[in-house]
Amino acid sequence: MSELNINSEGHLTVRCPFDEKDKIKNIGGKWDKIFKCWILPFTVGNIQYLLDNLNCTRVSTAVETRLQDQIQREDKLGKIKKMAKTDKPVQFKITGIKLPLYNYQKLGVLFALTNPSGMLLADDMGLGKTIQAIATACYKKYKEGIKKCLIITPASLKWNWPLEIEKFTDEKYVVIDGPSEERIRQWQRDDVFFYIVNYELVLEDLFGGREYRIDEENDDAFKIAQKMKLRKKAEVRAERLENIRNCVWDMIVIDEIHYMKSHTSKRSKNVKALKSRYRMALTGTPMDGKLEELHSVMEFVQPGLFQCKTRFLQRHAVFDFWGKITSYKNINEVRERIQPFFLRRLKKDVMKELPDKIYQNRYVLLSTDEIRTYKDIAKRGHSITEDVQAMVAVIRAKQFCDCPQLVDIHTKVNSKLEEFKNILRELVIENGHKVIVFSQYAKMCEILIKEIEAMSLKYLYIWGGTDQKRRVDMQEEFNKDPKIDIIIGTDAMSCGLNLTGADYVINYDDFWSPSIMAQREDRSHRIGQKNVVTVINFICRDTIEERIRDVLYNKSKVTAETLGDNTEESILRRLNPRELAQLL
């Protein structure tokens, strides 16, 4: 006779005859050598499968009681999902949140709270996944008494989180950043609620960092000594932070969890090794058309939800003669299994609640090499009293932020361009949106076009030399042809065109005039637009791009038409030398 029970961790335990073990393996059962039983996630689907497929199954009272709670919980989750498509206001107050949330955001928090151990929030870009995670953490702090929340994010988004935390809450936070000793102190602080860190520093600080392998044949004595020093430093750091690595966090939030889509990467293995009572994952792209990527993501969200990767693919993948996956099967089983832990809304689902335009700043962290060269450019050949030279330095620094190779051919890294490609991948390839891309510089547009072509995306390009008749034809082509993904151009594209086929506008760089920036947005946000328009601004942190708005946009709002063709130089000349230097 088979027996179903529940262990102290809330998992389903199964004892059954040996000849029925394969039935349990089919749904991800893992053998516990100590307690001599199979372990499974406690879900309604798992229990129903076992009752239907095992012979003479006896169910303990504890399982029956918990099963009724689970049925009620999954029913509530289903209702929450349906409520997102109605206009009925949600009466739900979240202590610690200063600003009101939209209905669908409140429902996202409710969905997260209804799951006792974790969930995957996969809302469309621009719908506020960050604030939903912050609100969930705050609710748990004030209602459940949790003490600390770890946020792991890509480096490019690390500084977006403090802005959102400050905007919506008064909670204390620390951003893990800076030199090694400073980071150790930051990890060990106990006076903050949010700990914000990027993936790379989790590996570097908590898991020994990179491997410094010594090549006996090619490394000279100096290089060997250097590697030994770095290895020792990493070991000491990991030892001092051992208590952090082994602690049980009250809550872990993983931003852009598709960065963990590979089962074998160090990033995935190390983050999954961290312990937490509650896990919340955020992404706009839960899988790139590959079930194995979703499997890796769900390993973090709900460990044990699926069987191991090998058995999972045996059940759900079709292979060719050489072992390559050609298609998938039994997809409905996967969908049903993740439903209680997965929530995704598109902009079109919640349009009635959204404003006409959503603004999203994407802060880009420059690499060490980029920062070094940027600072050199900012200091090069000007003083605070030399207006013209300072103006030249400002323009060159701005171009460097766009693409270091425009100013310095020796700088190989381009952090902003990498982030741009990530955004395009999510918006166009993963979610099928049409996008308008603006850059102030024609040369930058040409660089972006090469990347767009490398991604096999279809595009149109408008610049100052484009014939007026051709512009009108491009407008019609972009709006009506579903095969055209992107229209890219300089600010020659910012006037006169109706590009309502796109619902995303990407400002790869800012223009010097607020009126030109508004004209960019209005190519899409105009009569005939049926969707909410999201405007994404790329800003390199701690550079001129972060300061342009503070200095330039507070000046008298003289329109581009008044300033004529020399807008950039005219605005700069209206700044005094001290303000020019301040930009740098």
Image (cartoon, helix red, strand yellow):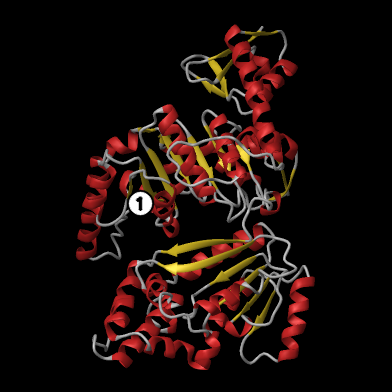
Q: Which residue is mark 1?
A: 201
Q: Is residue 245 left or right of residue 462?
A: left
Q: Amino acid at mark 1?
A: Leu
Q: How many marks?
A: 1
Give the quadrant of residue 426: bottom right
Whether residue 304 is visible here, answered yes or no, is no
Q: Is residue 332 left or right of residue 364?
A: right
Name of the residue lying farthest toward the front: 556
Q: In the image, is residue 399 above or below residue 457?
A: below
Q: Position of residue 376 (x, y in %)?
A: 28, 79
The residue at the point 71 percent across, 90 percent down is 468
Give the quadrant of residue 69: top right
Q: Nearer the viewer, residue 76 or 15?
A: 76
Q: In the image, is residue 338 above or below residue 202?
A: above
Q: In the image, is residue 111 above or below residue 434?
A: above
Q: Position of residue 26 (x, y in %)?
A: 67, 28
10 Å neighbourhood of mark 1: few (<14), some, or many (≥20)? some
Q: In the image, is residue 128 above or below residue 5?
A: below
For the N terminus, the quadrant is: top right
Q: Is residue 340 left or right of residue 156?
A: right
For the C terminus, the quadrant is: bottom left
Q: Position of residue 500 (x, y in %)?
A: 71, 70
Secondary structure found at label 1: helix
Q: Position of residue 576 (x, y in %)?
A: 31, 85
Whether residue 199 is visible here, answered yes or no, is yes
The residue at the point 58 percent across, 44 percent down is 105
Q: Nearer the viewer, residue 366 or 361?
A: 361
Q: Nearer the viewer, residue 76 or 258?
A: 76
